[in-house]
Image: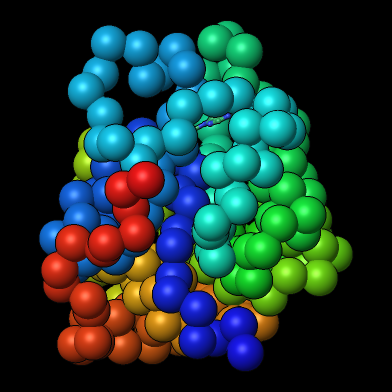
Amino acid sequence: MTAARPRRIFVAGSTGATGRALMPMALALGVDVIPHLRPATAAGRSLPEQAAVFALDDAAALDAALESCTTVIQLIGTMRKRFSSGDTYESSDIATTRLLAEAARRGAVDHFVLLSSVGAGRPRGSYLQAKARAEQIVAESGIDATVLRPSSFDGEGHRPPPGMAFVTHLFGMDRFHPIAIEDLARTLLYLAFSGAARGCVLEGSSLWQQVAEANSFSAWPLSAPSVAKQ
Ligand SMILES: NC(=O)c1ccc[n+]([C@@H]2O[C@H](COP(=O)([O-])OP(=O)(O)OC[C@H]3O[C@@H](n4cnc5c(N)ncnc54)[C@H](OP(=O)(O)O)[C@@H]3O)[C@@H](O)[C@H]2O)c1
């Protein structure tokens, strides 16, 4: 019974906006997380001892890091304005999802939580097409997956377009309602920790239902996980 295994969660994209909200929350709630960082990003930072620092195309390092993990949370993505740094939708959104899904399948990971985007179901434009491709890779991996398709983020440097929250609320467009990064981070942790919504693609009302469940969830470990130290 895989559901009985203590959850240990590999967080890809731990240094991004969502990851920066999720990591301290996980530690405060006692959820066992392994944050992944790229070597260049990790350089000069003080890191938690369980941090995993390597390039994701280092298959041996990725396999070793996932060996003790039950779950992957995939938060990696990029934006067109960062293409000049070398990251593209192909290399960040798609290729890293493929690397993670393949390694997860080789190892003992039984749950893959993917942060996608509203609109990925009917993708228009290269950003949403990359999101749809990442979703497809995870679906084809055969691992139980939970896909979140939120709209604009609010927090950690992200602001939705002015008036978006008001208009989406007024016209009942819950798929496009902005999401607070704190709510998103808590929901990701809840889904990964509890295993709720395995096999589900969450968008609009189904996503907001999980946000509400995450906010009322009270069975967090709340003490530091003992397995984090080797
Ligand atoms: N912003 C929105 O309103 C919105 C709405 C819906 C969905 N999303 C999606 O939600 C996800 C998370 O967004 P975010 O704003 O939290 O992310 P973010 O702040 O843009 O951070 C991106 C993260 O991905 C990592 N990354 C990028 N390319 C990588 C690679 N090749 N290998 C390893 N790590 C890589 C970055 O690492 P470094 O720190 O090393 O660069 C960083 O940790 C993205 O997929 C985004 O498309 C965003």
List x then y, in percent, for residue 80.
Answer: 57, 26
Question: Residue 37's image quarter?
Answer: top left
Question: Residue 163's image quarter?
Answer: bottom left
Left or right? Give the position of 223 relative to 110. Answer: left
Image quarter of the C terminus: top left
Left or right? Give the position of 180 relative to 103. Answer: left
Give the vertical position of 95 relative to 183 (above or below): above
Give the vertical position of 215 relative to 178 (above or below): below
List x then y, in percent, for residue 83.
Answer: 60, 17
At a point 35% along the width and 12% down the height, the residue shown is: 43
Give the vertical position of 171 relative to 152 (above or below): below
Left or right? Give the position of 13 relative to 96. Answer: left
Left or right? Give the position of 126 relative to 146. Answer: right
List x then y, in percent, for residue 52.
Answer: 45, 34
Residue 72 in view (yes/no): yes
At a point 54% along the width and 32% down the height, the residue shown is: 78
